[in-house]
Image: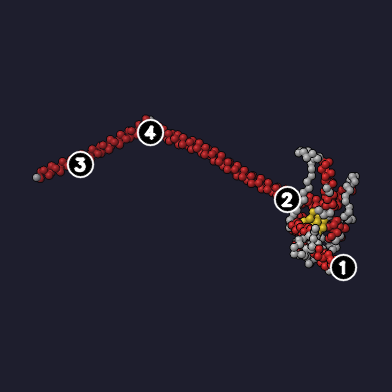
Amino acid sequence: KDQLPAASAELLESSDFELMGQLKKYVRSEGAKIAMKSLGKQFSDSLKILRARIDVTMPHYVRCLKPNDALEPDNFDPKNIVEQLRYCGVLEAVRVSRAGYPTRYPHEIFITRYYMLCPDRSSDTDNLSPYHREISANLTEDQKQLKRLVSRVATEVWKIEHEMFKRTAQSSAPPEPKDNRHALAQPKSLDEFMRLDFSSRCAVAGLQLGKTKVFLRREAFECIESIRNEKFGRNVTKISKTWRRYAAEQNLRQSRQAAITIQCLIRMGLALAKTSQLMKSFKAYLRMKSAAGKIQRSYKKYHAVTYKEGADLRRAKSAVVTIQSGIRGRLARKRVFALVHSIAKFQSQV
């Protein structure tokens, strides 16, 4: 009942075989006016719409697992879960993903996330190979900085893995088996590592620089994350130390200022109390001094009046008074006699 695709209908119409010509009038094709799209065409269009929707979104796939066959709550069967993961292909998908480059970052996100691993990206040349010209003049400034950052990351990852390999070789425990399908010959020294070209060094370290993304293997991603976390930890410790020092200095400064203020207030209170006591003592001293002066003056007056010096003074005063009274009496009598003589003379002339 399905209709024939338009391409097949055109092929039948272009055929010169007589039987095909007789079948043309019974064929329903997509090009007919009343005919609808075929199931294949409908499925193809639906798949294109789904693909376009997936390209503009970020899909997340969720695998539902039964905790137990009885579907009972709070009943977790580990064996059943592992069998479901194995039979559904989840473990194999994870293994395949880990064997390749499961972690992929666009260039901008990679620089934003791991910028602290190479702070001087614009001028860092220590991690570039001196045996190869790796920074081309055709690259933009952002591409140059990205390449320096990736080279620095690859060198740091190789150094850590090389150190771990030497420690494992020195220990008695055998190294853990790894998937070596993508493994390359490991350089024995840093100079041998730097003699490799840029792509080979990245491959040895477990990462690759693409046109739009940076691809990371699981081991390289874990190593880079550990380096990033270590740097963040040191920076957080430094910031915390600096802040705690600043807070302690501020607390010490405030405590010292408060202690000085309290000392000043206490000393001022003690000084006021001592000053009040001294003023009271001074006023008492002045009262005592005034009373002593009065007593001394009264005693001196009494002594002068009562004892020998006082008697001589009285006799001298009495003599002065007698002399004064005699002189004053003589002068008064003389004035009276003159006045009486004048009056008598005046009367005699009248």
Which-is-in-front pick, marks 1 and 3?
1
The residue pinned by badge 1 equals 17
On screen, residue 208 above or below 342: below
Image quarter for residue 185? bottom right
Tell me, for residue 301, which label it has, or none: 4
The residue pinned by badge 2 equals 235
Q: Mark 1: few, some, or many residues within 10 Å (few <14, many ≥20)?
A: few
First in residue order: circle 4 vs circle 1: 1
Which-is-in-front pick, marks 4 and 2?
2
Residue 329, given in percent of the width and then of the height, sits at 23, 38
**Does the image show residue 132?**
yes
* Residue 32 appears left or right of 289: right
Image quarter for residue 143? bottom right
Question: Residue flagged by tag 3: what amino acid is it?
Answer: Arg
Q: Nearer the viewer, residue 260 or 191?
A: 191
Q: Mark 3: few, some, or many residues within 10 Å (few <14, many ≥20)?
A: few
Residue 132, given in percent of the width and then of the height, sits at 84, 63
Give the alpha-carbon distance from disc 1 to disc 3, as whole Å.
Answer: 199 Å
Report if the CB atoms under discs 4 and 2 are less than 8 Å apart. no
